[in-house]
Image (cartoon, rainbow, N blue to C red):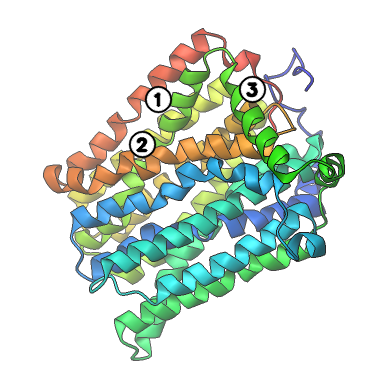
Amino acid sequence: MTAPDATSPAGHEAAPTSWRDSLAVYLQPRVLIVLFLGFSSGLPLALSGSTLLVWMREAGVDLGTIGLFALVGTPYTLKFLWAPLVDALHVPLFTRAFGRRRGWLVFSQALLIVAILLLALTDPARSPFYVALGALLVATMSSTQDIVVDAFRVESLPESEQAAGMASYVAAYRIGMLVSTAGALFIVSGFEGTGMPRSSAWMWGYVVMAAMVLIGTVTALAATEPGQSARAEAATQAEPAFTRVLHAAIGAFSEFLSRKDALAALAFVVLFKFTDAFSGTMTAPFVIDLGFSRNDYAAIVKGVGLAATLIGGFAGGFLARRYPLATCLWIGGVVQALANLSFSWLAFVGTSQWALAFAITCENFTSAVGTVIFVAYLSALCQNPLHTATQYALLTALAAVGRTYLSSVAGYVAKATGWPLFFVICVLVAIPSLVLLTWLQKRRHFEELGPVRV
């Protein structure tokens, strides 16, 4: 890959000449396809996460057990193990009918629908084991879909559309998460309003979410197979399947680990979003415990939270285009940590809808800014197009460690400290990532990265 222009921020393409040019890029068919695939990727995450935690809390499950359910996100941290299979193997019937990437997309989405339906049939109050198993299946199918979507957008977008694709993907991803949190809660409340028992309302709410996965399926069917994928398929067609898998796996690991300061960069990947994940694990139970109704929380998250997410996503895209990557990471790291103080303030204020709206706005805006910038950094780390999908899966899997394992004790911390102090602790856990950021910056790590690719 060519080195970035020395006259512009490292890894950034030139800004468009006018707002009309910028808008035109966002309306390109390839960018719109990536946008809808971003929604499809974001939709399942909350169904095995925060939405499920609200369901469990309403069913009377204690905070400690709820916190441990963060562990069902394990597939997001291990998806790099089967990413080479997605890169190298064909899915019978699907690959022949739709192509290498689109075949895997349709296949993974079909399995995801089945997994969500199975989770819908469980009962958190009576069988938490089966709930955990169902959530684990949803996370596995969701992470597999993420592998394919990441590969698809890397290979389908030209360099001139990468920044627009990044901002669109992240904004749509967050919208998908909001639909499966606030949207799902509204749907459950609507079913309850018809006289349906609460357990049945939750079941049908998840059925509706399963049906929404079809948005991603329709998008995959409407898309065209990326040219890079077709060429890679032709180039490796004569190789045995095992050889293709081996090349994808070994190349992704060896190329990255041979870089200077590779271990420090990997530690930074794990810790950058940890402050966001640690607080996010307990946000929904906190709001319910504070005395807000499910509908109050859902209305504010869907309304104010959605607007803040959209603005934050495109603000992050603007920063990623205008400023050096290290500067953007400092901005994202600091603001997403400080946003937790709004929840500490909310704990003292009590059941004020204005205070809740302010806290949700801070959380969604800063999280979206941090996510776009973080995606830009992960993309800059993936410099070899021969195994971008596997390498990107490795990095995003490591990024999920904070959300999955380190955040699993959040419930016990909240139980021991109380809500105001808990969210102060959420700010403090950002310090290790900022220390690593300082060290990497002094080592000129960011200046040695290639152009940002998403």
Residue that carries the numbered disc 1 in the rendered image: 433
Separation of marks 2 and 3 at Cα, in angstroms: 29 Å
From the viewer's side, name the closer residue of 91 and 142: 91
Q: Is residue 210 above or below residue 420?
A: below
Pointers 1 and 2 in contact (C-beta within 8 Å): yes
Pointers 2 and 3 in contact (C-beta within 8 Å): no
Residue that carries the numbered disc 3 in the rendered image: 255
Residue 426 lies in quadrant: top left
Question: Considering the image in quadrants, where does the N terminus appear?
Answer: top right
Three-letter amino acid code of the residue under disc 3: Glu
Q: Residue 308, percent across and down? A: 50, 50
From the viewer's side, name the closer residue of 195 and 346: 195
How packed is label 1: few (under 14 Cα within 10 Å), some, or many (20 or more)? many
Separation of marks 1 and 2 at Cα, in angstroms: 9 Å
Instruction: Work out whether residue 316 can be spotted.
Output: no
Q: Residue 104, percent across and down? A: 69, 57
Q: Is residue 228 above or below residue 433?
A: below
Q: Is residue 13 left or right of residue 136?
A: right
Helix, strand or loop for disc 1: helix
Helix, strand or loop for disc 2: helix
Residue that carries the numbered disc 2 in the rendered image: 275
How packed is label 2: few (under 14 Cα within 10 Å), some, or many (20 or more)? many
Residue drawn where x is 71% and y is 68% of the image: 218
Compare marks 3 and 1 and give the one earlier in the sequence: 3
